[in-house]
């Protein structure tokens, strides 16, 4: 992630120092940046002079102390709080008091990182998506300690790097990794209940919903080990709220080494002459699957809005730019009708009596007040 973020900053004109504790990783990252720009030049996507200038702006820093004159440091090291704390403390002793210290963490609270610092007010989350040069979204996460001026500077800096910023509350999964959970979990649930197979569920989300990839294709692409680990960490971080419960289906795939594309097998078979089923074309079934997963996504997005995780606009932008959803979920809710969303959630709850199907209070309130998320 670090080398991708370095490219984004350098492409926007910043002088970048790239540091890694492992020298060979650092040299490899600089080499791979050169190779990637070489390919872009060969494809005619960028001119050679421009590419050379960008590459020249990224310099290796073999010692952490070389970062002493930085105005912004974005940490993207191993996802372990204790290691991050040590690095932030070392950084604090090096840089000036005006330097912003940011973390690209996906799952650690920004408040806990900030708490390890002498000046916690200058610590903030700046969360890129992988691959950073291609993904448009960046979530910016102020901790409760973060100074407003630091938030404003972080937002204006990242916006000037041609990225779309969504401001998120410092809660597990921030926006995208929280709101996207039902895309996977409800799809797996439908499969586990024997309602449809993987291919049919994927087909429903692509043909009815316009999603670029179905949930199972996407989990195979991300890696079942990675996707399962995120689900488990979000579930634990939410004090075991059943809404985020991981599945045995994905756990077993991970245990079996069926990790997805990278291991040749996941939900699908990626080896030579694969044996993958064709989806059914039962339109009623496809529509049922699509509507069930969509309403669970909308409900999660509405609840995130209700709990002030982010604004309706930021939630919609985050899902479109961070995970390529074809439409903002809350805009979708407006289009379907809020009443319809509540009816569908209540139908699921009536059937299962499980807490995961509880309807967001915000949706109910919006019906009472005759509201929509966005003005027409
Ligand atoms: N991979 C993703 O898709 C993704 C997406 C968004 C955010 N993130 C976050 O970005 C961070 C990095 O993730 P990654 O996938 O790039 O990890 P990675 O393991 O590929 O890279 C981490 C690098 O940090 C280096 N490192 C470890 N300890 C260090 C230290 N004390 N000082 C300096 N360098 C050190 C390692 O040598 C390694 O090269 C994590 O916090 C992760 O949660 C990852």
Image (cartoon, grey):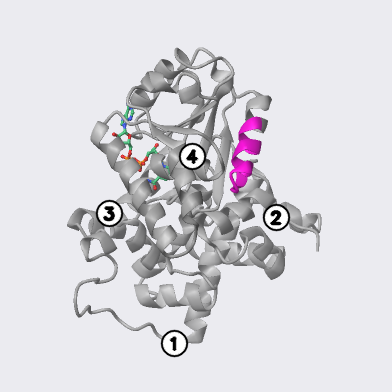
Q: Residue at x 60, y 62 (%)?
A: 346
Circle 4 residue: 172
Q: Is residue 140 above or below residue 316?
A: above
- Is residue 5 or residue 88 the one in the foreground? 5
Position of the N terminus by quadrant = top left
Q: Which sits earlier in the primary sequence, circle 3 or circle 4? A: 4
Q: Is residue 273 above or below residue 233?
A: below
Circle 2 residue: 364
- Is residue 366 or residue 22 the one in the foreground? 22
Mark number displayed over residue 125: none
Q: Is residue 157 magenta?
A: yes
Magenta-tinted stretch: 153-167
In the image, residue 177 lies at what x, y percent?
48, 48
In the image, residue 47 lies at what x, y percent?
50, 57
Q: Would you say 371 lies left or right of 108 here?
A: right
Name the quadrant containing residue 341.
bottom right
Q: Which sits earlier in the primary sequence, circle 2 or circle 4? A: 4
Separation of marks 4 and 1 at Cα, in angstroms:
38 Å
Which of discs 3 and 4 lies nearer the camera? The answer is: 4
Which of discs 2 and 3 lies nearer the camera? The answer is: 3
Under 8 Å from ligand 1: the CB of mark 1?
no
Circle 1 residue: 281
Position of the C terminus by quadrant = bottom right
In the image, residue 114 lies at what x, y percent?
50, 22
Q: Which sits earlier in the primary sequence, circle 2 or circle 3? A: 3
Q: Is residue 288 magenta?
A: no
Q: Which sits earlier in the primary sequence, circle 3 or circle 1? A: 3
């Amino acid at each position: 992630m670090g080398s991708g973020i370095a490219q984004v900053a350098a492409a926007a004109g910043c002088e970048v120092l790239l540091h890694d504790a492992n020298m060979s990783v650092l040299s490899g990252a600089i080499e791979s940046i050169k190779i990637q720009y070489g390919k872009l030049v060969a494809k005619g996507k960028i001119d050679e002079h421009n590419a050379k200038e960008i590459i020249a702006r990224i310099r290796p820093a073999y010692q952490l102390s070389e970062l002493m004159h930085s105005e912004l440091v974005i940490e993207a090291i191993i996802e372990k709080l204790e290691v991050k704390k040590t690095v932030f403390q070392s950084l604090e002793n090096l840089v000036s008091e005006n330097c912003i210290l940011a973390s690209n963490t996906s799952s650690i609270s920004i408040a806990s990182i900030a708490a390890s610092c002498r000046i916690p007010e200058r610590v903030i989350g700046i969360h890129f998506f992988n691959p950073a040069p291609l993904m448009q979204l960046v979530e910016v996460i102020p901790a409760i300690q973060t100074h407003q001026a630091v938030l404003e500077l972080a937002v204006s800096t990242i916006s000037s790097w041609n990225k779309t910023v969504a401001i998120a509350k410092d809660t597990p999964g921030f926006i995208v990794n929280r709101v996207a959970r039902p895309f996977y979990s409800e799809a797996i649930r439908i499969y586990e209940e024997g309602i449809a197979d993987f291919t049919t569920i994927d087909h429903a989300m692509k043909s009815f919903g316009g999603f670029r990839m179905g949930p199972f294709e996407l989990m195979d692409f991300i890696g079942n080990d990675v996707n399962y680990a995120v689900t488990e960490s979000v579930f634990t971080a939410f004090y075991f709220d059943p809404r985020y419960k991981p599945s045995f289906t994905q756990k077993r795939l991970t245990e079996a080494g069926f990790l997805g594309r990278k291991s040749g097998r996941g939900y699908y078979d990626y080896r030579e002459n694969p044996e993958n089923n064709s989806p059914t074309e039962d339109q009623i079934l496809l529509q049922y699957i699509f509507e069930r997963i969509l309403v669970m996504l909308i409900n999660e997005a509405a609840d995130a809005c209700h709990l002030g995780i982010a604004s309706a606009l930021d939630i919609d932008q985050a899902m479109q730019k961070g995970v390529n959803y074809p439409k903002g979920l809350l805009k979708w809710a407006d289009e379907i009708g809020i009443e319809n969303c509540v009816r569908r959630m209540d139908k699921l709850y009536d059937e299962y009596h499980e807490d995961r199907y509880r309807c967001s209070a915000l949706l109910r309130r919006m019906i009472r007040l005759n509201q929509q998320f966005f003005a027409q």
